[in-house]
Amino acid sequence: GPSVDDGDPLPYTGGVQVHPADLLGIMLGEFVVHGHDIAGVLGRPWPIDSDAAVEILDSLAPSCRHGWIPRPREASVP
């Protein structure tokens, strides 16, 4: 059957186009980050698996390069 790797990019926040497989990693990141917030309020540990962290960062990289993080402006010299 079809796989998320076969899908076309989808519109996401800020006008960024996100591949479906990357969207799954971004969603995982949301659960990890907000789970950490909740655990902190409750005074509980929230260990983050290194494989999950790699998946999250790999999924965010394309979106950061193509829209979420603006390119630095070139300094103009008078």
Image (cartoon, rainbow, N blue to C red):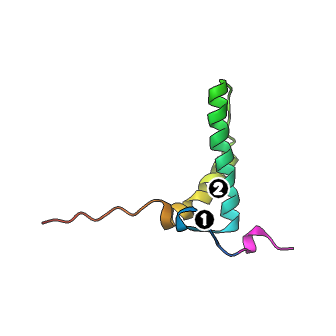
- How dense is the environment of label 2, judged by Cα within 10 Å: few (below 14), some, or many (20 and up)? many
Q: Amino acid at mark 1?
A: Tyr
In the rendered image, the residue lying farthest to the left is 78
At x 66% / y 62%, what residue is drawn? 22
Q: Quadrant of residue 72?
A: bottom left
Q: Is residue 47 above or below residue 27?
A: above
For residue 26, the mark is 2
- Checking the image for residue 76, the label placed there is none
Q: Amino acid at mark 2?
A: Ile
The foreground one among 32 and 53 is: 32
Residue hosting label 1: 12
Q: Percent x, y for residue 30? A: 65, 48
Residue 2 placed where, x, y %? 82, 73
Alpha carbons under labels 1 and 2: distance apart: 11 Å
- The answer to whether 38 is drawn above or below residue 69 in the figure is above
Which image quarter holds the C terminus?
bottom left
Q: Secondary structure at mark 2?
A: helix
Q: Residue at x 62, y 59 (%)?
A: 59
Label 1 close to label 2 by CB (< 8 Å): yes
For label 1, count other residues whose C-alpha is less than 10 Å away and answer few (under 14), some (14-19) or many (20+).
few
- Apparent side of residue 72 relative to residue 1 in the rendered image (left or right): left
* View extreme (right): residue: 1
71 left or right, relative to 49: left
Disc 1 versus disc 2: nearer the observer: 1
Q: Position of residue 3 (x, y in %)?
A: 79, 70
Q: Position of residue 46 (x, y in %)?
A: 68, 33
Q: Is residue 70 above or below residue 10?
A: above
Going 73% across and 70% down the picture, which residue do you hit?
5
Q: Quadrant of residue 73?
A: bottom left
- The tag earlier along the polypeptide, 1 or 2, is 1
- State which region is magenta: 1-7
